[in-house]
Image (spheres, helix red, strand yellow):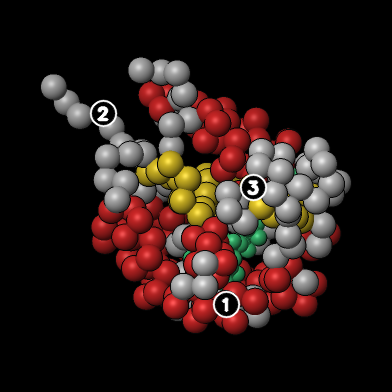
């Protein structure tokens, strides 16, 4: 009997392009485990782990954390998911990270959300997050049912320290210099699929149709 195929998918895009929002929709419809590097780092900061304390100033300043630190962290989590299909959000973000991932796993698809920087700047100042789960809200786009509180747990929402306009500008700059070359890395491997637009609700049907066609066996409800 052959083992079921494991699918490995990455979601990329500039800060605020909707990676978290689209990932939440993907895992509702597809049997993929969502791993977000930013959520893992913020959980470490919240729990005041040694790693979290070391990385906090880097993240608050809108800089990337060192490649070896984040690669070790993510590859350890992926090893624990050896028999599951996964969706990786926020990693890899440099060519060196992409190479470290490639040494361990081959990636089936890279979904690239291509959203203009001006749209992103407007979005991030009105983002509210539930840190324990990583659920994101936006005052205009998807407000919580009760202002300031998470829909599922009723716990308070907070704004990320790195969502100030100056830090967002720095994050976008580091995306251009350090992360855009990763798109080329995956384009050369023939696995890059780009989705362009300014609204997640218009981008999402294209992502969903692509995944349905490419990975029919991991739709929720398909045995
Ligand atoms: P993160 O956490 O990976 P970013 O900067 O890549 O952070 P971010 O900010 O989490 O990405 P996103 O997930 O792409 O953005 O977007 P989102 O949260 O879904 O949506 C943004 C907002 O827009 C939300 O409020 C959402 O509700 C709203 N929205 C969505 N769609 C629409 C729409 O159509 N219209 C409107 N109006 N609103 C919408 O990384 C954080 C930091 O961690 C470190 C770095 O320091 C990084 O800066 N880090 C790493 N460092 C090194 N290497 C790595 N691999 C690292 N990973 C993380
Ligand atoms: Mg995110």
State yes or no: discs 2 and 1 in contact (Cβ < 8 Å).
no
State the image coordinates of residue 164 (x, y, percent, origin top left): 77, 72
Residue that appears at 52% across and 35% down: 27
| Whether the residue under disc 2 has CB within 8 Å of ligand 1 | no
* Quarter of the picture holding the N terminus: top left
Label annotation for residue 4: 2
Label 3 to label 1, Cα distance in Å?
Answer: 20 Å
Q: Secondary structure at mark 2?
A: loop
Q: Secondary structure at mark 1?
A: helix
Label 2 to label 3, Cα distance in Å?
Answer: 30 Å
State the image coordinates of residue 35 (x, y, percent, origin top left): 46, 51
Classify residue 214 by image quadrant: top left
Q: Residues within 10 Å of mark 2 (few under 14, many from 20)?
A: few
Disc with the residue nearer the chain's start (3 vs 1): 1
- The residue that mark 1 highlights is 56
Q: Secondary structure at mark 3?
A: strand
Q: Residue 157 or 106: which is nearer the viewer?
A: 157
Label annotation for residue 30: none
Disc with the residue nearer the chain's start (2 vs 3): 2
């Amino acid at each position: 009997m052959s083992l079921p195929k494991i699918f490995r998918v990455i979601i990329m895009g500039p800060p605020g392009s909707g990676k978290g929002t689209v990932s939440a929709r993907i895992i509702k419809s597809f049997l993929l485990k969502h791993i977000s590097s930013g959520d893992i780092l913020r959980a470490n900061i919240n729990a005041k782990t040694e790693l979290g304390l070391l990385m906090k100033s880097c993240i608050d300043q809108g800089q990337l954390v060192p490649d070896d630190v984040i690669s070790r962290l993510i590859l350890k989590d992926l090893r624990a998911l050896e028999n599951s299909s996964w969706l990786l959000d926020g990693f890899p973000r440099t060519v060196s990270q992409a190479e470290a991932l490639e040494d361990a796993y081959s990636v089936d698809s890279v979904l690239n959300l291509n959203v203009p920087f001006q749209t992103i700047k407007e979005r991030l100042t009105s983002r509210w997050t539930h840190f324990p789960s990583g659920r994101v809200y936006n005052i205009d786009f998807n407000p919580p049912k009760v202002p300031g509180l998470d829909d599922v747990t009723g716990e308070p929402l907070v704004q990320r320290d790195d969502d100030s306009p100056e830090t967002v500008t720095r994050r976008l700059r580091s995306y251009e210099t350090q992360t855009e070359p990763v798109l080329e890395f995956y384009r050369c491997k023939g696995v890059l699929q780009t989705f362009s637009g300014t609204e997640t609700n218009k981008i999402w049907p294209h992502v969903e149709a692509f995944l349905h066609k490419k990975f029919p066996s991991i739709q929720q409800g398909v045995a």
